[in-house]
Amino acid sequence: MKINRLTIFKLAILFFLASCGTMGKDFNASQVNNIQNHVTSQSEILKNFGIPFKEGTQNGMVMWTYQFDQYSAIGPDNSKDLVILFDKKDTVNSYRFTSTRSE
């Protein structure tokens, strides 16, 4: 089977494009320092971060997840996640922020 240079080039481009991608929606991580447990309201979170990427419940509390992941065949992958639990008064009960880069 004879493979020409154009076919090899096309396969290389296809591999490169298939190994790059994003998941989630980027959010302003600099606002995380403004979150205070039992003080910050759900409406303030919505104003500062926008609509969450995922919504759910945990132990009867509303849970919002903000997530942004970038994958690349060349260079480092980047990830940041913010998970927020709200109490019955729609204020932040607790939150967790993780990131692979310094914000």
Image (tube, rainbow, N blue to C red):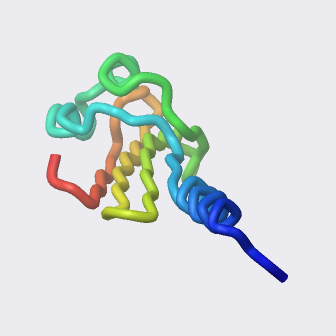
Residue 46, how many percent across, how many down? 40, 21
Residue drawn at point x = 57 percent, y = 53 percent: 17
Q: Give the tally of numbered discs.
A: 0
Residue 99, how many percent across, how many down? 28, 56
Residue drawn at point x = 15 percent, y = 53 percent: 102
Q: Residue furthest right?
A: 1
In screen coordinates, is 92 left or right of 21? Answer: left
Residue 76, how many percent across, how many down? 32, 63
Quadrant in the rendering for residue 11: bottom right
In screen coordinates, is 13 left or right of 44? Answer: right
Residue drawn at point x = 30 percent, y = 22 percent: 48
The quarter of the picture where the N terminus appears is: bottom right
Q: Is residue 43 above or below residue 66?
A: above
Q: Is residue 42 above or below residue 58?
A: above
* Nearer to me, 35 or 72: 72
In screen coordinates, is 13 left or right of 64? Answer: right
Residue 8, how many percent across, how many down? 64, 68
Quadrant in the rendering for residue 37: top left
In screen coordinates, is 45 left or right of 3? Answer: left
Q: Is residue 75 above or below residue 95?
A: below
Residue drawn at point x = 33 percent, y = 47 percent: 94
Q: Is residue 29 above or below residue 80?
A: above
Q: Residue furthest bottom?
A: 1
